[in-house]
């Protein structure tokens, strides 16, 4: 009979079937079993029952012996759940969390005995011992600590080592998302030895301090060069490693960060790990403001040719970044471009471009590595002396 069918049959009716009754008798004859280990052999039958309750019912149905003082399979591991709960609570002291999961390092000897029993009575209706242990310990901890269980998105994972009798913790990072505006030049996005501070430190240090974390990482939706301002709002996530606290005053942290005057954050709030992956997958178009200084004055009629830059440009990796990026040729799309004069040899160019476009090189041409370019179209040397990100079109 299929597992799905057994789920709907009452246990007392199922054990009356010759096959299941024979399995139960074989299991009890193989060695002393506690109610948990006996009931777990029939975990797929009458699934509204707990394994210990199921084991007691099976024992009564086949007239089996009373539960032993020491289980021959689990070594009375399930009888020690109170002790395991106490160990876990001690390990969790001092950590703030709302969502909990339990995992285990199985005892190889118990696994060997369990698999040997499965070979004799069948494993098709059984549940592994580790799975039941994790569930029962999780229920006890969540009831005692008034937290929620969640195997997919826990704040902390309690890891029980059955062979060693110890409990360890896997502390999940704290993730906080928001958007930043970089108001000053000369500021890298992430920590860099050559610079006294960074956006990561300005934003991440206060969050990490309040969370009592070990360290932090900064994930941005792209980045701007150190000498480029970002006046648009760039999405980011701060990842705090091993945080002791998670319920933070996000409004107060936003106010503290923004007092520095170099960076402004908006919408700071906790998020999940998946937000990091989502950020990395985004490839938004961006709008830039570039100041181009020309080697010599160019007539207005000639500047009108800049409209011809809208379309596809070919860009070989700029010479300024060749030390850290592969030398590749990329094709990027310029979506829109406007310009105005700032002086006889100065132009302000506003350009919306595909993600990954090098705007400084779109101005200078980078010695022919970017084509077409402002310099090529105007037939004059051009240099981008200022660059701002005005908008990130997520």
Image: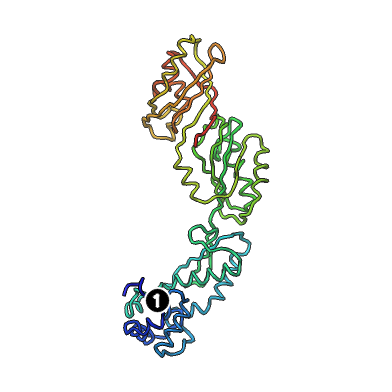
In the rendered view, tell whether residue 201 sits above or below residue 81.
above
Characterize the local packing of mark 1: few (<14), some (14-19) or many (20 or more) Cα atoms within 10 angstroms. Answer: many
At x 41%, y 18%, the residue is 308
At x 38%, y 82%, the residue is 13
The residue beneath circle 1 is 45
At x 55%, y 58%, the residue is 155
How did the renderer colour the structure? Answer: rainbow
Residue 10 lies in what quarter of the image?
A: bottom left
- Left or right side of 230 for 309: left
Image coordinates for residue 114, horizontal then vertical, percent: 38, 76
SS at badge 1: loop
In the rendered view, tell whether residue 307 sits above or below residue 139.
above
Q: Foreground residue, 82 or 288?
A: 288
Image coordinates for residue 183, horizontal then vertical, percent: 61, 32
In the rendered view, tell whether residue 11 sits above or below residue 383.
below
Q: How many marks?
A: 1
Image coordinates for residue 190, horizontal then vertical, percent: 54, 40
Image coordinates for residue 381, horizontal then vertical, percent: 46, 15
- Left or right side of 126 for 134: right
Quadrant showing the N terminus: bottom left
Q: Foreground residue, 118 or 311?
A: 311
In the rendered view, tell whether residue 133 sits above or below residue 277.
below
- Left or right side of 104 for 240: right
């Amino acid at each position: 009979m299929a597992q799905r069918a057994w789920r709907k049959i009452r246990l007392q009716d199922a054990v009356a079937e010759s096959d299941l009754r024979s399995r139960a008798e074989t299991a009890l004859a193989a060695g002393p079993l506690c109610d948990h280990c006996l009931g777990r052999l029939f975990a797929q039958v009458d699934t509204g029952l707990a394994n210990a309750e199921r084991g007691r019912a099976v024992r009564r149905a086949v007239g089996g012996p009373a539960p032993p003082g020491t289980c021959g399979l689990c070594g009375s591991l399930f009888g020690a759940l109170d002790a395991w709960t106490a160990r876990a609570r001690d390990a969790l002291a001092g950590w703030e969390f709302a969502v909990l999961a339990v995992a285990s390092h199985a005892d190889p000897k118990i696994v060997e005995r369990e698999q040997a029993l499965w070979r004799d009575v069948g494993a098709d209706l059984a549940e592994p011992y580790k799975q039941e242990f994790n569930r029962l310990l999780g229920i006890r901890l969540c009831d005692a600590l008034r937290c929620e269980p969640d195997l997919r998105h826990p704040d902390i994972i309690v890891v029980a080592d059955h062979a060693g009798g110890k409990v360890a913790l896997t502390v999940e990072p704290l993730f906080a998302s928001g958007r930043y505006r970089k108001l000053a030049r000369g500021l890298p996005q992430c920590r860099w030895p050559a610079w006294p501070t960074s956006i990561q430190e300005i934003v991440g240090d206060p969050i990490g301090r309040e969370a009592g974390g070990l360290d932090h990482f900064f994930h941005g939706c792209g980045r701007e060069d150190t000498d480029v301002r970002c006046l648009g709002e760039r999405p980011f996530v701060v990842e705090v490693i091993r945080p002791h606290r998670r319920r933070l005053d996000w409004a107060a942290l936003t106010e503290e960060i923004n007092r520095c005057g170099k960076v402004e954050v908006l919408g700071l709030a906790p998020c999940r790990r998946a937000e990091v992956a989502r950020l990395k997958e985004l490839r938004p178009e961006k709008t830039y403001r570039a100041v181009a200084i020309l080697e010599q004055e160019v007539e207005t009629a000639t500047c009108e040719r800049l409209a011809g830059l809208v379309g596809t440009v070919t860009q070989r990796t700029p010479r300024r970044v060749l030390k850290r990026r592969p030398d590749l040729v990329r094709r990027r799309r310029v979506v829109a471009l406007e310009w105005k004069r700032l002086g006889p040899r100065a132009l302000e160019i506003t350009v919306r471009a595909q993600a990954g476009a090098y705007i400084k090189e779109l101005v200078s041409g980078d010695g022919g590595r970017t084509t077409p370019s402002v310099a090529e179209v105007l037939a004059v040397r051009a240099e981008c002396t200022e660059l701002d990100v005005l908008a990130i079109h997520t």
